[in-house]
């Protein structure tokens, strides 16, 4: 069994940026590693993502939203995450089941036991070995995303960004909702402190990347590097 590491945190806190930096770092030193994201990561899950994030889908019922996230997760776990872990590799995932508890549970008020049952069906009980939490005041994260979005709208066609900004249906919910999500994450961390590591996301990218690499290092002992005989 390999190592399963997830990234969590509020909108715009730098999860995708740091997930990519960690992926590149591990790959550069020869670890078998894949980077994926939720919702998404497989052909079918990316199609479900499009439905979930679409700003036009204002009528989506909370149960539908919960089940779509879970359906996308079920496909990702069975098609990609479990098979890769079974080869002994490292899976980095940009959001995972904790986001369901924070967003649909604490954010939308869905029953947490019910979410647990749905999540267990979707994942077969697969939990991360380590969850990296990027902590940033909700307003700051939303502002970062707004700035990125405006910048991309002003830029010349064809400009590419390392982290394409996406202002989606869930971002567009009100500030009180995002505050409940953040409080939900704090509660999840309190309940399972051994699995979580929390970082202030209000610091330069490179410093944050160093801190994350430091926390991940102990888990790497159980992974065999490609082309390296240990
Ligand atoms: N440490 C940082 N300091 C300042 N800006 C940052 C930092 N990390 C990321 N950013 C910028 O903030 C924006 C959001 O970053 P990113 O997309 O990585 O966050 P995210 O947590 O993945 O967001 P989302 O919730 O949309 O998935 C981007 O424009 C990114 O360049
Ligand atoms: Mg992201």
Image (cartoon, rainbow, N blue to C red):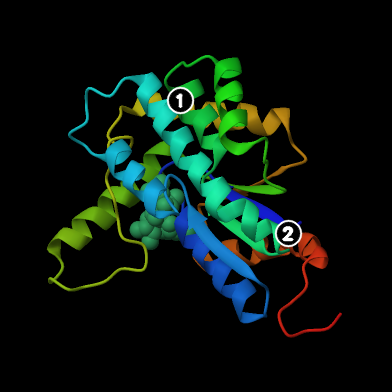
* Position above or below: 208 against 9: below
Give the percent coordinates (x, y) of residue 4.
Answer: 67, 53
Q: How many labels does the image show?
A: 2
Instruction: Residue 146 in the image: state x and y as whole percent.
Output: 26, 48
Q: Is residue 175 above or below residue 82?
A: above
Q: Residue at 22% of width from left, 31% of height from top?
A: 57
Give the labeled residue for mark 1: 104
- Reading the chain from its start, which is encountered first: label 2 or label 1? 2
Residue 82 seen in the figure:
yes
Element type where label 1 sits in the image: helix
For this rendering, which residue is in front, 100 or 78? 78
The quarter of the picture where the N terminus appears is bottom right
- Left or right of residue 78: residue 139: left
Instruction: Answer with left or right where residue 134 lies relative to residue 155.
Output: right
Q: Which residue lies under the disc numbered 2?
A: 2
Residue nearest the observer in this picture, 140 or 20: 20
Mark 2: give few (<14), some (14-19) or many (20+) Cα within 10 Å.
many
């Amino acid at each position: 069994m390999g190592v399963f590491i997830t990234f969590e945190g509020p909108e715009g806190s730098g999860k995708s940026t740091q997930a990519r930096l960690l992926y590149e770092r591990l790959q550069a030193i020869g670890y078998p590693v894949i980077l994926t994201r939720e919702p998404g990561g497989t052909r079918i899950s990316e199609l479900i993502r499009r439905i979930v994030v679409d700003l036009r889908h204002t009528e989506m019922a909370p149960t539908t939203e919960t089940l779509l996230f879970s359906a996308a997760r079920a496909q990702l776990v069975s098609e990609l995450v479990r098979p890769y872990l079974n080869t002994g590799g490292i899976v980095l995932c940009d959001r995972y089941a904790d986001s369901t508890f924070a967003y649909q549970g604490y954010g939308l008020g869905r029953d947490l036991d019910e979410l647990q049952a749905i999540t267990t069906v979707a994942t077969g009980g697969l939990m991360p070995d380590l969850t990296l939490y990027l902590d940033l005041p909700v307003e700051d994260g939303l502002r970062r995303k707004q700035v990125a979005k405006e910048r991309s709208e002003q830029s010349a066609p064809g400009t590419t960004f390392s982290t394409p900004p996406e202002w989606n249906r869930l971002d567009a919910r009100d500030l009180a909702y995002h505050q409940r999500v953040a409080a939900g994450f704090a509660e999840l961390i309190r309940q399972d402190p051994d699995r979580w590591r929390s970082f202030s996301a209000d610091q330069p990218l490179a410093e944050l990347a160093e801190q994350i690499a430091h926390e991940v290092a102990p888990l790497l002992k159980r992974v065999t590097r490609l082309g390296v005989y240990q």
